[in-house]
Image (cartoon, helix red, strand yellow):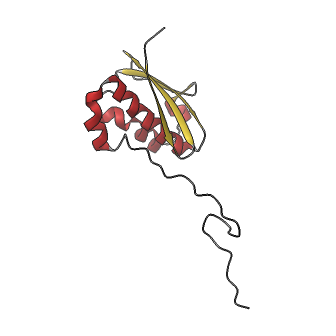
Amino acid sequence: MMEYYEAVGRRKAATARVRLYPGGDGSIIVNGRPLDEYFVRDVDVVQLKEPLKATAMENRFNISVKVKGGGISGQAGAVRLGIARALLKVDPDLRPVLRRGGFLTRDARVKERKKPGLKRARKAPQYTKR
């Protein structure tokens, strides 16, 4: 049984379980697929690698991710938070660096529910005077 550091990240409706395996070559596997195959947009890849870049730990771990729920963008955000939290478990001294980059803040914005009588959460039907 190999030792690993595990953390959970959430964003919108997505939840990511991230495992960091020390002594790796920096490969990232998401839901059994390579990173660039799962997240096809470069923006998402860059975003989720940010905590690793900020702490200069890009090639120190092999990362395994299980992510479900939400869309691609939300999943990338969830993975990013999961990686940042797992890095904290590796080395608690990284907290100031991660905090400064804003990687430890859970983005609590979620889709607002639809209200009765409205078309969406706040969009009302067009008003007719007569």
What residue is at 71 percent from the left and 70 percent from the top?
A: 117
Camera-side residue of 37 and 98: 98
Left-right relation of 55 to 121: left
Residue furthest front in the image? 116
Q: Is residue 68 above or below residue 123?
A: above
In percent of the image, x 39 and y 35: which residue is there? 49
The furthest residue to the right: 130
Q: Residue 120 appears in which quarter of the rendering? A: bottom right
Residue 93 placed where, x, y %? 25, 29
Residue found 38% across the figure and 21% down from its top: 61
**Residue that lies at the very extreme toward the bottom in this rendered image:** 130
Residue in view at x 31 percent, y 43 percent: 101
Q: Is residue 55 visible from the viewing direction of this image?
A: no
Give residue 103's quadrant in the image: top left
Residue 47 vertical position relative to residue 67 in the rendered view, above or below: below
Residue 22 in the image: above or below residue 29 = above
Report the label total.
0
Is residue 123 among the parts visible in the rendering? yes
Could you tell me which quadrant the C terminus lies in? bottom right
Image coordinates of residue 9 in percent, x first then y, are 47, 36
Q: Where residue 30 sits in the image (x, y, percent)?
A: 53, 29
- In the picture as drawn, the residue positioned furthest to the top comes out as 1
Picture coordinates of residue 53, whole percent (x, y): 32, 34
